[in-house]
Image (spheres, rainbow, N blue to C red):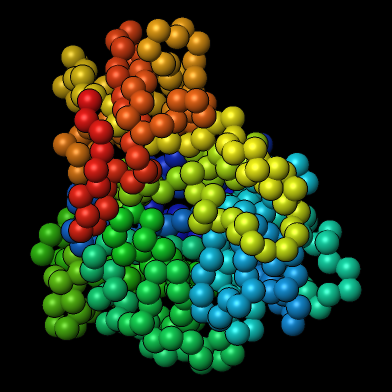
């Protein structure tokens, strides 16, 4: 079984490289995402300076309806939803009875429904798990993963692109804020190219991030038209023309818009570099189904300690009263030691063991890593490390190609923040 993106044929025309996302033994089947369109440096530069368009087939959606839906969800998940206004977005964990994380979700509340946006490999267990607790409540759960599809715009000019194209929506969920009022963790409903689109803002890469939920029937059309409207034709090549070719005529105003936006289609690789730099850990990579909330480094963003009971709360409360977990996610900046063959700094890959000075026993391992363009290609990583070694400034080491590379634990997950110089210990 394989889950294919509705946009896949465009990626094939562009000769994009693909990679498998997540475990192959999953109810969702094999999921492939675009790794790159062959120009990683340009894709990353567009994200930081202009705008990129991402296809996200590894995301899934559960729709929750009924008058008791918010009250019901509030009794189930770790985040406080009481008092949550429509068109707001909150992040939360859905735990099992052992307090382990079954899903890392975005809760998008709209006037007529609430949307739960999750990793595709967590969708089925989340849907079944929540359904088991519905007794007499007016709550209906529906898996919308096949009926909708997720795409995203990331970059400074992404807002300008949507403002130039969006129209007011109609219907029960169209009474929210205008798009130009879209602050972080807020949502709106607009019409793009004749299709209703839910947009919520989450700046995962340190730049403006516009996450879009589109009907699966119409997402190919929306994707093509976004490319056509935002791509700068002054730099067209055959690959870009093939991607943006959804009509034969382009108005002068669209040409001016595209010159201002300078959009590029991009893949997982460019996004992954930027989200690590920005301090955004991901479920199924940096923490997962075996993790406790306290081990994720995003506890305060997902968990309320002042709400009523929910599944797994006893484990969360016991861990909190104990003071700390056995391990925790940290950010590490490594020294730059060039590889003799490539000249690039050696990079600890996922799964690389970490050691404390003078201790031959591993005290953690890398979960995600990259060479950071914003830090002069310095190797940076997220890692799960035993709690005794997670203090900022702690020096750890990894062995890469037989050579010991030292790293320093940072004071927070973000290596780079726009308009901010984040302090970090030097090697």
Asked if residue 232 can be seen in this view, the reply is yes
As drawn, is 92 to the left or to the right of 152? Answer: right
Total numbered circles: 0
In the rendered image, residue 387, in percent from the top left (x then y), is placed at 52, 29
Q: Is residue 61 above or below residue 369?
A: below
- The C terminus: image quadrant: top left
Horizontal side of residue 87 vs 1, given as left or right: left
Camera-side residue of 93 and 304: 304
Residue 237 in the image: x percent, y percent?
17, 55
Image quadrant in which the N terminus is located: top right
Residue at point 13% right, 77% down? 256
Position in image of residue 130 (x %, y %): 76, 60
Return the residue nearer the eye: 182 or 331: 331
Q: Where is residue 224, by image quadrant?
A: bottom left
Which residue appears at 84% of the width and 59% of the height? 132
Q: What residue is drawn where x is 37% and y is 43%? A: 412
Answer yes or no: is residue 243 visible: no
Q: Position of residue 355 (x, y in %)?
A: 42, 16
Quarter assignment of residue 26 = top right
Whether residue 48 sits left or right of residue 291 in the image: it is: left
Along the line of sight, the residue nearer the viewer: 338 or 425: 425
Residue drawn 62% across the image and 70% down it:
81
Please tell me whether residue 315 is drawn above or below residue 199 in the rendered image: above
């Amino acid at each position: 079984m394989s889950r294919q993106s509705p946009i896949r044929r465009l990626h094939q025309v562009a000769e994009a490289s693909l990679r498998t996302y997540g475990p192959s033994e999953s109810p969702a089947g094999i999921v492939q995402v675009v790794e790159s369109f062959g120009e990683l440096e340009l894709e990353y530069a567009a994200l930081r300076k202009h705008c990129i368009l991402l296809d996200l087939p590894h995301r899934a959606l559960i729709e929750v309806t009924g008058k008791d839906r918010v009250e019901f969800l509030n009794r189930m998940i770790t985040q406080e939803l009481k008092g949550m206004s429509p068109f707001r977005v909150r992040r939360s964990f859905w735990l099992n009875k052992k307090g382990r994380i079954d899903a890392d979700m975005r809760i998008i509340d709209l006037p007529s429904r609430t949307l739960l946006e999750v990793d595709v490999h967590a969708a089925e267990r989340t849907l079944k798990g929540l359904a088991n607790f519905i007794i007499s409540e007016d709550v209906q759960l529906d898996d919308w993963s096949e009926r909708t599809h997720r795409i995203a715009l990331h970059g400074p000019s992404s807002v300008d692109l949507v403002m130039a194209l969006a129209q007011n929506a109609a219907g029960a969920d169209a009474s929210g804020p205008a798009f130009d009022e879209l602050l972080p963790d807020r949502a709106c409903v607009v019409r793009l190219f004749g299709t209703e689109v839910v947009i919520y803002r989450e700046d995962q890469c340190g730049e403006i991030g516009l996450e879009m939920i589109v009907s699966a029937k119409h997402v190919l059309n929306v994707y093509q038209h976004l490319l056509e409207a935002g791509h700068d034709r002054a730099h067209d090549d055959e690959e870009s023309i093939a991607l943006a070719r959804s009509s034969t005529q382009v108005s002068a105003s669209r040409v001016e818009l595209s010159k201002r936006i300078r959009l590029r289609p991009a893949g997982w690789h460019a996004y992954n570099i930027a989200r690590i730099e920005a301090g955004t850990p991901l479920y199924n990579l940096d923490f997962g189904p075996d993790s406790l909330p306290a081990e994720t480094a995003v506890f305060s963003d997902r968990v309320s300690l002042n709400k009523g009971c929910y599944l797994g709360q006893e484990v969360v409360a016991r861990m909190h009263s104990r003071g700390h977990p056995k391990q925790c996610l940290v950010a590490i900046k490594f020294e730059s030691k060039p590889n003799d063959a490539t000249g690039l700094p050696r990079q600890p890959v996922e799964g690389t063991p970490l050691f404390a000075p003078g201790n031959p026993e591993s005290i953690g391992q890398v979960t995600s890593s990259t060479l950071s363009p914003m830090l002069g290609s310095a190797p940076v990583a997220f890692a799960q490390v035993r709690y005794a070694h997670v203090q900022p400034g702690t020096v750890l080491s990894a062995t890469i190609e037989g050579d010991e590379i030292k790293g320093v634990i940072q004071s927070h997950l973000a290596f780079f923040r726009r308009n901010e110089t984040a302090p970090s210990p030097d090697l």
